[in-house]
Amino acid sequence: MAIRMGFAVALVALGTAGCSTIVEGTSQDILISSYPTGANCQVERNGNVVANVPKTPQTVHVEKSNTDLVVRCNKEGYRETTGIVNSEIAAATFGNVLIGGLVGVAIDAASGANAKYDSSISVSLDKDDSAEVATQAEDAPVTSEPSANEPIKMEPIPDPVS
């Protein structure tokens, strides 16, 4: 009877191993938005692009990892802005500690299921004042010095009254 009970406990432990993999999955969707809207963003992990957003807002599908995501957004007239999507431990991982043991923890860690990302990020872009100054300088009236070939117009100076 003790052998059967031990076998049943082992079977339950293996059956619940990888709890986060089963409950949470190994990938997830993240909403990428910006203010103002319409920015082009890249989602990067360890310097590698894992998703592109041609125009915010948009949802991207990414594989989970214990590494944070960097969201780099650009829009004409605005400075490039970077945001971070934090990677956190998935709650179902704690079920492995109680029920699944080390096997479940190892399965979840290998698949990335022990991690989860924030479900959304909003990146706020600042106006690029240097672009505005350059535009104003381009719109300014052009004044030029007379060239060496142009005659200089001179006005006579009136005689002082003595």
Image (tube, rainbow, N blue to C red):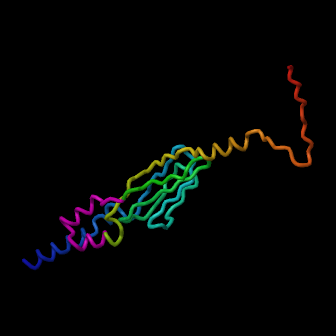
Residue visible at 82% across and 44% down in the picture = 145
Give coordinates of residue 45: x percent, y percent: 45, 65
Query: Which percent across, then down, holds residue 146?
Result: 85, 44
- What range of the chain is rendered magenta? 87-108
Q: Residue at x 50, y 52 (%)?
A: 81
The residue positioned farthest toward the bottom in the image shown: 3
Asked if residue 98 lies in the magenta stretch, the reply is yes
Q: Quadrant of the N terminus?
A: bottom left
Q: Residue shown at 88%/29% (left/top)?
A: 157
Give x and y (percent) for residue 139: 73, 40
Residue 117 part of the magenta-drawn span: no
Q: Residue furthest top?
A: 162
Judge from the rendering whether residue 97 lies leftward or rightward of residue 80; answer left or right: left
Task: Judge by depth and name the residue closer to the eye, 76 or 6.
Answer: 76
Which quadrant would the C terminus be assigned to in this image? top right
Up the image or down, 151 lies above or below 26; here it is above
Q: How many marks?
A: 0
Is 109 above or below relative to 79? below
Which of 41/58 is in front?
41
Pick the front one: 129 or 89: 129
- List the single residue furthest toward the front: 162
**Relative to 135, 158 lies left or right:** right
* Residue drawn at (51%, 65%) of the image: 49
Most prominent secondary structure in the magenta stretch? helix
> With respect to residue 86, does 101 lie above or below?
below
